[in-house]
Image (cartoon, rainbow, N blue to C red):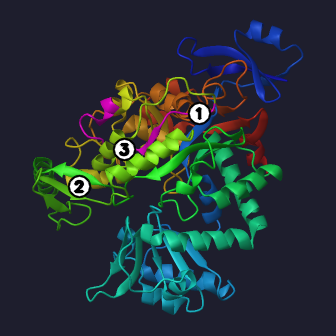
Amino acid sequence: MRLFSGGSILTMRRESPRAEALAIDGDRIVAVGEAARVRAAAPGAEEVDLAGACLLPGFIDAHHHFSEGALFNAMANLHWPAVRSVEDVLAAVRARASETPPGQWVIGEGYDESRLREGRRPTLRELDSAAPEHPVLLIQYSYHEAVVNSRAHQVVDLPLRRPDPPGGEIGRGRKGEPTGHMVENAMAPFYSRAIGEALARDEAGYMAHLARYQDRLFSAGLTRVFDAAVSPQMEEVLGRAVEQGVLRIPVLMMLAGAEGMFMPPRERIGAARTGEGQDLLRRGPLKMFMDGGERAAMALPLRVVAAAGLASVRRMLRRRRLASLGPSGGMAGRLDRSDWCLRSGILFYTEAEARELVNQAVSRDLSMAVHAEGNEAIDRALRVLPRSPGDRAANVGPHRIEHFFFPGADAIGRAAEASLATAVQPTIVEWVGDRLLAMGMVGRWAFTPLRAMLDAGLTVAGSSDAPVVDLDPLVGIRAAVRRRAASGEPLEDGQEVTIGEALEMYTVHGARSGGLEHEAGTLEAGKRADLVVLNEDPTSLASDELDRLAVERTVCGGADVYVRSEVSDR
């Protein structure tokens, strides 16, 4: 039994937001409140002096590709600035191929073609030359696109020349020749085969990577993650991680299909139910992709496109830098004359197909988590998702929309009225902010409008989408409060939130979005002892002072899983 006191204690309960002391026994909180009352409830407890630090509920990442993050942590690192050119990418492929037996996959992840010196991705032929005896899969930073070589096609038994699959695109050159570029469902067979073989070949190695990756989460103050797409094979591996004592952080799994996370997960319906499992590994909602990543399904009125284009040109003239309007400074799409909207992106389902899948899943006790980024995908998700039931069992969360990047004018109100939850990624606001400013979109169509979402009463769960962007919740909290682009330029769109609200997103709202209010999100007697200690009270800081925050201690299930002073002393 331990008793924490001597600093700020933020309970994240609005009716009693602060406490003088907190006591835990085993994996449970036993008392919170006035110091004398807590000591009386915990006689003989070991005293832990916070020394002026701040204790609050452990952070929850409500959308994090945890199992894949652990896997790709061991793959060839293609992130900028580790690679700065196509030649750097190819050198990384050659290096990995030299230490990999012929016939086994060479996998790299994180390349961003817009940051490479040549402004393009590697080609199939270049990969053939770099690794002629290996199937190669290079995954773009978004995890929605990849580049593969000829040997990869042979391994998955697909011809180089074939039509685009439903919900996917295959890159082709000017003469129709394949470039190796695979988008969305086109990459699914390569991705599933490569990952499946990597896991089957060296599960013990994967467990070691999982343990190291988990330690990174603990050092960031995370005590629970929602894994955003878990295949049946990966679920079995995670189950063995629990049995072996490797998995220590509670994981809520969004259930994906065996053929790839973008494919319809029909085999999960009837074979799994939301809420099944134990706290360390629990089945959550069924994952469904309504649109793509960078191929988000958008339908922008022509007047918005024109206004944004004019604002973009004015911005460049003010900066005396009139560049061509490419991917970062203009919009591409097809004009739909039926409603005079510029449409772009990929929709994975017709509305009838989506409704059928949702109805089947809900009738078999599955909640839904729908990936929807663009306004057209969000509208379709809102039309097919039922209202979240108010009498849900414990461990069963509301239906969710993941990302919710570009909601239309009435989408926020409709989502709140249906009692849906959203999982947002404030760090991505910072990441794409400069592009949105260059396109003239800021102030004309809101991106992740946190202020409006909270004001409407939506459950807005904070998350990272790691490994796409930084997994650190403190980075996300700063981004939500500041609403700045990576360059430091403020968006000034009125969608910033307070520090207290940002903390709620990563605690209270995170727990609520997974149906875990009884276990996590606030500091209350009876709840799981998941705690984080920060060096300062974040609510006492101005937004520009949030960089000073650091995690001092993380307690997961009553156990110290990270203590900064102990790490520093090693």
Q: Label 3 crowding class (10 Å Cα cut-off): few <14, some 14-19, many 20+?
A: many
Where residue 396 sits in the image (x, y, percent)? Answer: 59, 33
User: Badge 3 is on which residue?
Assistant: 381
Where residue 240 sits in the image (x, y, percent)? Answer: 78, 55
Q: In which quarter of the image is residue 31?
A: top right
Q: Which residue is located at x 60 percent, y 26 percent?
A: 517
The CA distance from mark 2 to mark 1 is: 41 Å
Q: Which of 185 and 333 is in front in this view?
A: 185
Q: Nearer the viewer, residue 277 or 364?
A: 364
Of pointers 3 and 1, the one earlier in the residue sequence:
3
Viewer-side label of 2, 1: 1
Residue type of the residue flagged with mark 1:
Val
Q: Which of 287 and 116 is in front in this view?
A: 287
Q: Which range of residues does the magenta coloring cover?
A: 395-414
User: Badge 2 is on which residue?
Assistant: 438
The CA distance from mark 2 to mark 3 is: 29 Å
Task: Tell me if 509 is positioned left or right of 444 in this view.
Answer: right
